[in-house]
């Protein structure tokens, strides 16, 4: 990304929708709050649907508004909890897309802010399943035309898993907008492992362009075997800087903490973690409390329901993704380019 490359920001959001087929926007109950935010940003009311749970645990979901001949977008984030598992949410979304196609929808686009099983995109042991590819096959089987996800773990594996059109959005524009308040500080963008170096570099170039100032780079080495993470090598020009550690998700937070401590030892004055999906599984509270990381910045693709409100208020900033998702929907509907959303 060359210097001066345009990057979308929430202040650029538009609501004009003068496309062809009528647009319908649905959000399943598990992602209702985020769906309503997308609807407000898009200037498009949520279409009505019914979700029904049966006594034996089976369920059905059907549209209540007519969808024949329409361009349909369905919002559902596929993280586990607080009331449904990732498998429940996945199954409900698949069945609903099938019902929409059966009801005559011209095109169905799945808007999946957090994609479950995206980390199981390759074999790491003999006879391992490649679940990302299996999930892709399920969406294709029910008639999904376009699949949109935000900061998938491995964009190349994600794109190769699907045969339908995929859009790999990134939260980088939101993080760039957040980091504008740090203009004037010496900044260094850090990848917590070599695998995330490309993601960090895309963000670094976008930030450098937006701030019109040099931004350093660095990365921490990491090896994982049987769930054990090791490796202490740090490379980068982080001395006397504010280190911005960029990653797609935080689970326990051990990887981020290792990287933060390595950056501190290399001379970083302050460390801020910019992470799209805040899963915050068991053990994360101890990591959050560690002073090596000054601040966590996440998005609302996964609400921080596993954390208490006090912890969230004290050390976590939550950036809303509703406007970003709405802008992507608007452009897909109108056939417009997604380039300044940092989509290629």
Image: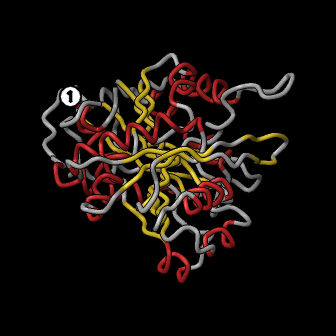
Q: Nearer the viewer, residue 185 or 321?
A: 185
Which quadrant, please, contains the N terminus?
A: top left
Residue at the spot x=37%, y=43% of the render?
203
Position in image of residue 49 (x %, y %):
44, 49
At 73% across and 65% down in the image, what residue appears? 282
Residue at mark 1: 336
How does the figure colour the protein chain or chains? secondary structure
Q: Is residue 164 visible?
A: yes
Front residue of this view, candidates 67 and 340 = 340
Q: Could you tell me which quadrant the C terminus lies in?
A: top left
Q: Quadrant of residue 100?
A: top left
Q: Seen in the image, is 202 located left or right of residue 291?
A: left
Front residue of this view, candidates 86 and 247? 247
Q: Residues within 10 Å of mark 1 (few under 14, many from 20)?
A: few
Locate residue 7 relative to residue 221 in the image: left or right: left
* Local SS, label 1: loop
79 with respect to 297 (left or right):
right
Q: Is residue 223 above or below residue 280?
A: above
Which residue lies most toward the top here? Answer: 163
| Viewer can see residue 300 | no
**Farthest residue in the bottom direction?**
310
Residue at x 43% of width, y 30% of height = 103
Residue 187 is situated, as x and y percent measured from the top left of the image, at 36, 56
Could you say where residue 280 lies in the image, as x and y percent from the top left? 63, 62
Looking at the picture, does residue 154 appear above or below residue 64? above
Q: Residue sitting at 25 percent across and 62 percent down?
A: 184
């Amino acid at each position: 990304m060359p210097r001066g490359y345009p990057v979308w920001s929430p202040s650029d959001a538009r609501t004009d929708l003068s496309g062809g087929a009528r647009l319908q926007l649905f959000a399943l109950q598990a992602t209702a709050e985020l769906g309503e935010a997308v609807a407000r940003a898009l200037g498009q009311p949520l279409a009505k649907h019914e979700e029904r749970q049966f006594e034996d645990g089976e369920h059905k979901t059907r549209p209540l508004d007519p969808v024949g001949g329409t361009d349909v977008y369905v919002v559902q984030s596929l993280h586990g909890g607080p009331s449904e598992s990732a498998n429940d949410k996945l199954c409900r979304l698949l069945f609903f897309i099938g019902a929409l196609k059966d009801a005559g929808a011209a095109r169905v686009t799945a808007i999946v802010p957090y994609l479950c099983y995206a980390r199981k995109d390759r074999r790491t042991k003999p006879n391992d399943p490649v679940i990302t590819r299996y999930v892709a096959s399920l969406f294709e089987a029910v008639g999904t035309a376009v699949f949109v996800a935000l900061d998938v773990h491995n964009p190349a594996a994600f794109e190769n898993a699907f045969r339908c059109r995929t859009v790999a959005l990134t939260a980088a524009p939101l993080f760039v907008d957040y980091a504008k308040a740090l203009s004037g500080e010496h900044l260094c963008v850090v990848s917590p492992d070599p695998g995330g170096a490309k993601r960090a570099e895309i963000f670094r170039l976008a930030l450098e362009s937006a701030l019109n100032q040099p931004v350093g780079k660095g990365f921490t080495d990491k090896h994982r075997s049987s769930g054990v993470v090791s490796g202490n090598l740090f490379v980068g020009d982080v001395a006397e800087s504010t280190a911005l550690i960029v990653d797609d998700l935080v689970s326990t937070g051990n990887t981020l903490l290792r990287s933060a401590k390595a950056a501190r030892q290399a001379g970083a004055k302050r460390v801020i973690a910019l992470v799209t999906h805040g899963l915050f599984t068991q053990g994360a509270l101890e990591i959050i409390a560690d002073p090596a990381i000054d601040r966590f910045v996440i998005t609302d693709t996964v609400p921080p329901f596993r954390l208490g409100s006090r912890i969230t208020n004290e050390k976590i900033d939550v950036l809303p993704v509703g406007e970003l998702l709405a802008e992507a929907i608007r452009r897909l509907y109108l056939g417009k380019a997604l380039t300044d959303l940092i989509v290629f």
